[in-house]
Image (tube, rainbow, N blue to C red):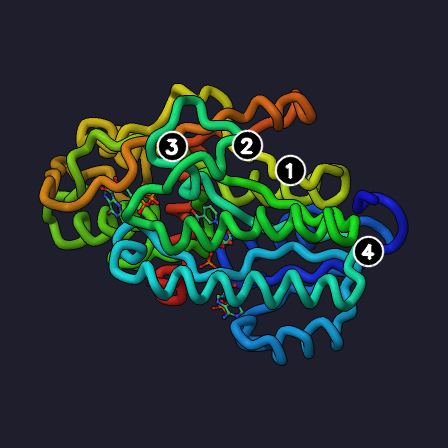
Amino acid sequence: MNGSVGPMRVLVTGGSGLVGRAIERVVKKEGEEREGEEWIFLSSKEANLMSAEETRAAFEKHHPTHVIHLAAMVGGLFRNMRQNLDFWRYNVFINDNVLQAAHEFGVVKVVSCLSTCIFPDKTTYPIDETMIHNGPPHESNFGYAFAKRMIDVQNRAYFQQYGLRYTAVIPTNVFGPHDNFNIDDGHVLPGLIHKTYLAKKEGKPLQVWGSGRALRQFIYSLDLARLFLWVLREYDEVEPIILSVDGWDKNLSLQRTTIPRYTCLLPILPDVATSVCATSKADGQFKKTASNAKLRKYLPDFKFTPFRAAVKETCDWFVANYDAARK
Ligand code: NAP
Ligand code: GDP
């Protein structure tokens, strides 16, 4: 059964994070909420999903018919490298608690969130949905990657044993308002936005980490949110679906010549003239370029926000919310 029939009570775990806040904005402010739908955005303050009891209590309280499961321990390359064990344990507990509570409380559909970080390091390109379990992930984030892969295993098992259509999406690197702008723990784009802001303020060069050769794809959190709604309401497969921008061969290179070209567009740093590469810092996986062919088969007309416009909106948000932003 897909999500488009009958009244829906949608529980969004991780409702206070980057992706959760984007879904909330699309639902509440962009008029995407449909009649008969009720949305509940959960944060760790209401329920620590590491605890099976607290997870069950949240499901008992809200009685969702549908769940978007975002809650996770999340971080950029350098936090992953430091805390592989924590990423594995936190995420395995959270995922098992949420999926099992969903099953016990009769939830008809769960859409969980994987990531293109979880694919094998040694692979062919572009990566597609069939390749998740084809080989070990990059060693930098094996804890997070294996924990996320187990969601796919668990979804298949719920289908096999109970006929439940619990599924997952696979986004590329996400960015947008409400991101984690912490330089040591967060992802590359919010990290660079924050570092650029400081470089401008202090009159210092922008420092880009790694060799500059690594390639990444990015999706704007608001676009991801709109796609999440479609998956929840219309997508009927247990098999996951990659949510990625077009042109899988057009990654953003992190070379120092490229980053300032993007970031110099931004209102916060018209005069950061120089950048340097800290080449002793890790690159992580060289590339994880993923195909959105499956998505395009379903949604040929979906329009992604142009990258520059999305980065500008994110920077504007960061500057306007500097004191309150996670950093
Ligand atoms: P985020 O901004 O760090 O948000 C994480 C969310 O999880 C927050 O709402 C947080 O609640 C909640 N959470 C963490 N631990 C929890 C716990 N023990 N109990 C209950 N809630 C807990 O992360 P995000 O970037 O939005 O990520 C959302 C999903 O997208 C995750 O599943 C992530 O793996 C996936 N994803 C992210 C990216 C990316 O580039 N960011 C890329 C691919 C996939 P509090 O606010 O209360 O702490
Ligand atoms: P990943 O995509 O999961 O590997 O994680 P990130 O979003 O943290 O991206 C890491 C890539 O960006 C690596 O190749 C880093 O060397 C590079 N990078 C360059 N500057 C930064 C920075 O300021 N912060 C982070 N997190 N990564 C950076």
Q: Which residue is mark 1?
A: 239
- Identity of the residue drawn at 76% across and 50% down: 164
Q: Earlier in the sequence, mark 4 or mark 2?
A: 4
Rendered image quadrant of residue 293: top right
Q: Earlier in the sequence, mark 2 or mark 3?
A: 2
- Identity of the residue drawn at 9% across and 44% down: 280
**Image coords of residue 182 (percent x, y):** 30, 59
- Identity of the residue drawn at 56% across and 61% down: 95
Q: Is residue 219 visible?
A: no
Q: Is mark 2 within 8 Å of ligand 1?
A: no
**Element at badge 4?**
strand
**Image coords of residue 20 (percent x, y):** 57, 56
Q: Compute the Cα span from label 3 to label 1.
A: 19 Å
**Element at badge 1?**
loop
Question: Which of pointers 1 and 4 indicates the residue nearer the eye?
Answer: 1
**Image coords of residue 2 (percent x, y):** 80, 43
Q: Which residue is mark 3?
A: 288
Q: Residues within 10 Å of mark 2 (few under 14, many from 20)?
A: some
Amino acid on which the number 4 mark rests in the picture? Met
Q: Which residue is mark 4?
A: 8
Q: In front: 102, or 12?
A: 102
Amino acid on which the number 1 mark rests in the picture? Glu
**Disc 1 and disc 2 in contact, CB within 8 angstroms:** yes
Q: Is mark 3 within 8 Å of ligand 2?
A: yes
Q: In front: 146, or 224?
A: 146
Q: Which residue is mark 2?
A: 129
Q: Compute the Cα span from label 3 to label 4.
A: 35 Å
